[in-house]
């Protein structure tokens, strides 16, 4: 049987990340294709800020490092979106590198703090 103290400590390990995910879901999404890249860049900058805050609030060093890396990934994708001129840019090597570089740390964070449900 699992120790209730350890179980509650494990449950609280990802609290800051869960709060960040709630904030992430509350961010508006741009539906206007003419401003999609600029809005995407702004949204990803906001996500980077949210996950930097989660990293700062986390007491677990692994969660803190993964949340900080996820924040850097959101910044990287925002940088790319800020310079993209069209959807064709997504298929370029630079676009593919930016996408991979931004998603890899997010997936790593989910390995430590899985999305419930």
Image (cartoon, rainbow, N blue to C red):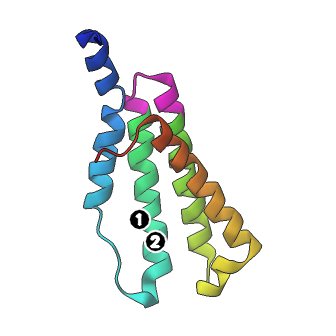
The residue under label 2 is: 40
Magenta-tinted stretch: 56-65
- Dot 2, how many residues are within 10 Å of its Cα: few (below 14), some (14-19), or many (20+)? some
- Quadrant of image for the N terminus: top left
Q: Is residue 101 above or below residue 95?
A: above
**Residue appearing at x 76%, y 72% in the figure:** 93
How many marks overall? 2
> Are the residues flagged by discs 1 and 2 in contact, CB closer than 8 Å?
yes
61 in magenta: yes
With 92 as the anchor, is 54 left or right in this view?
left
Secondary structure mostly seen in magenta is: helix
From the top left corner, tell me how far across and down residue 112 is, in percent. Answer: 47, 35
Q: What element carries label 1?
A: helix
Q: What element carries label 2?
A: helix
Residue 5 sits in quarter: top left
Residue at numbered disc 1: 43
How far is mark 1 from mark 2, CA to CA?
A: 5 Å
Q: Can residue 82 be seen in this view?
A: yes
Which residue sits at x=56%, y=56%? 103
In the image, taking residue 9 as reference, residue 76 lies left or right, namely right
- Give coordinates of residue 58: x percent, y percent: 39, 28
Q: Which residue is drawn at 73% across and 70% down?
A: 94
Farthest residue, direction bottom: 34
* Residue found at the very far right of the displayed protein: 93
- Residue, x 29% and y 62% (percent of image)? 27
In the figure, residue 56 lies in which quadrant?
A: top left
- Residue 5 belongs to magenta span: no
Q: Residue 76, labelled with which disc?
A: none
Q: Is residue 86 visible?
A: no
């Amino acid at each position: 049987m699992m120790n209730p103290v350890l179980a509650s400590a494990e449950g609280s390990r990802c609290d800051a990340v869960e709060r960040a995910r709630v904030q992430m879901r509350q961010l508006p999404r741009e539906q206007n294709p003419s401003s999609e890249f600029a809005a995407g860049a702004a949204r990803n900058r906001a996500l980077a800020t949210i996950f930097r805050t989660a990293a700062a609030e986390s007491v677990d060093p692994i969660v803190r490092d993964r949340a900080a890396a996820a924040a850097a990934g959101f910044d990287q994708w925002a940088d790319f979106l800020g310079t993209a001129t069209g959807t064709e840019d997504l298929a370029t090597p630079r676009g593919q590198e930016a996408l991979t570089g931004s998603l890899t740390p997010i997936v790593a964070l989910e390995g430590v703090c899985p999305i419930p449900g």
